[in-house]
Image (cartoon, helix red, strand yellow):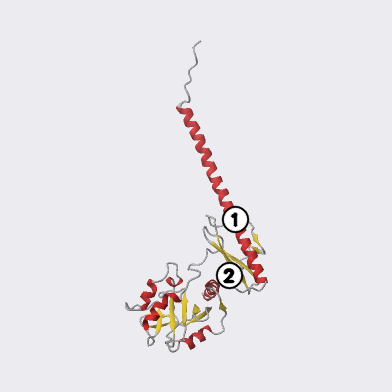
Amino acid sequence: MMPRKSYGFTLLEMLIVVAIIAVLVATAIPIFANQLEKSREAADLANVRSAYAVVLSNAMLGYEDPNDIEKVVQLQQKQDGFQGFQDITIGDVSDKDKARWIGQPQADGVCAVYYDEELNGVILDWTGGYPYLRNEDFFSYTKKAVDSLGKQHDYRFDSGYPKKNSYVKDVISSLDEDSLLKTGTWVFLRGTKQTDTGYLVWTSYDQKTIKRDQETPVIILDQKSGKYYVSSSIPRYKDNCIKIAGDITAQETTAEMAKMIGSNKAYNTIDAAYRAYIKVLNASK
């Protein structure tokens, strides 16, 4: 009896098998990616809930240190919004609560979790974080320029000052890539006396959009106290630039800046001041 010959698979059979595998892979990959994204979202929600519990507990205990009542959670998710969850509640904050649930999660964004005294509750801010370095030492940029000027000079650097020999160029060249001072308009002022400390005034408006002689929201940082204030300023046009803090001389600095700060609330961090600034900015539009 002759043995049967084995010819293996035909080309058509192989193509059919490959096609079936390709269909299975094409079906499985999106399902796997979707499940992976859901797991990232679940981890993000767990981390935000943990931060919420810490912030609320510390606020109820009367803590005032920003590190205790402000937490920033780095999100792991790679897509905007929530893909696998609906009608979410974290603590007593619902995603329908527009006052305390701000924005929606963004891919590789952050959620700022902080206690708001006015609302007497925890805020969840999903707006993607802050467009600046959160622990920036603003006065480190101006120290070298101040030290080189001597006692007789007017210690003032307006970011819009155009002259090539301006010390502003040196300050700008030393800014970190994500510095707040790379946006908007700012001025550093300091009195001529050795005991005088500096003030930094910043607004999100740039030189082209500032309306001179009109009240403009600003953030003021007092170097001596380390506190931030949200106030307003009347920009003036002089020396071919718009001066966001008006035309304050070195001799007038301390007294005039005290007037601008007035009785405004002091903030311990740039984050808290920036949030308050945005509220004032939106209200003024």
Picture residue at 49% right of the left edge, 31% below the top: 16
Q: Residue furthest left?
A: 164
Please give the residue where the numbered disc 2 appears in the rendered image: 67
Tag 2, which secondary structure? helix
Give the mark nearer the N terminus: 1 vs 2: 1
Residue 39: percent from left, percent from top: 59, 52
- Residue 43 is labelled as 1
> Comparing marks 1 and 2, which lies closer to the viewer?
2
Disc count in the image?
2
Residue 212 in view, yes or no: no
Identity, as a three-letter code, of the amino acid under mark 2? Asn
Tag 1, which secondary structure? helix
**Relative side of 4 to 117, left or right:** left
Q: Residues within 10 Å of mark 2 (few under 14, many from 20)?
A: few
Residue 143 in view, yes or no: yes
Picture residue at 44% right of the left edge, 75% below the top: 140
